[in-house]
Amino acid sequence: MPLMEAGFAASRLDAVLGWARKYSLFQYPFVTACCGMEYMSVAAAHYDMDRFGAGFPRFSPRQADLLMVVGTVSHKLAPVLRRIYEQMAAPKWVAAFGVCTCTGGFYDDYATVQGIDTIIPVDVYIPGCPPRPETVLHGLLLLQDKIQRQGRRGR
Ligand code: SF4
């Protein structure tokens, strides 16, 4: 008798872990500048990140698995960002929210980090100044696809 007819659901451990991880993201918002306004807009009821299982921010990096870097990062702040990333337990993922985090944006100067991927690994880049909420949600969906594909391997 096939497994399905006998009341069993067959799957691979990788697929189940990927599914569970992508829909239970606990984000740590590292908010430094004006993109924070748009972050709040996405997190609030109208756009409702909770629909995607990523609506519950944690304010300790030790309890988070998604680091949302939101806003301009200066060289003075860079060691703090690195330390927060290191405090997160694996598996963990990073979203660069806004063009300042992706490339430094229009702050092409000595004080600004020219892309946070020069400090920590980045899993998804969300462009825009600031990004539209729809762009943020699209970035989240791309990240979820990536997490699903990673399965138990993590990054
Ligand atoms: S990308 Fe634009 S809105 Fe976001 S922090 Fe930089 S300057 Fe501000």
Image (cartoon, rainbow, N blue to C red):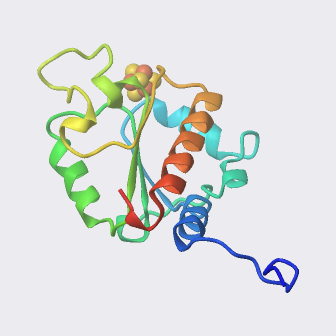
| Residue sitting at x 53%, y 25% | 131
- Can you name the residue that lies furthest to the front here? 1
Quadrant containing the C terminus is bottom left
Residue 111, image x, y percentages? 15, 25
As rendered, which of 25 and 32 lies closer to the eye? Answer: 25
- Can you name the residue that lies furthest to the right here? 5
| Residue sitting at x 44%, y 68% | 152
Residue 92, image x, y percentages? 38, 60
Question: Image height check: is 7 above or below 102?
Answer: below
| Residue sitting at x 44%, y 63% | 59
Question: Image height check: is 154 above or below 98?
Answer: below
Residue 54, image x, y percentages? 60, 55
As rendered, which of 125 and 81 lies closer to the eye? Answer: 125
Quarter-of-image position of residue 113: top left
Q: Quarter of the picture for ligand 1?
A: top left
Quadrant containing the N terminus is bottom right
Residue 73, image x, y percentages? 27, 35
Horizontal side of residue 85 vs 40, given as left or right = left
As rendered, which of 124 and 75 lies closer to the eye? Answer: 124
Horizontal side of residue 6 vs 67, given as left or right = right
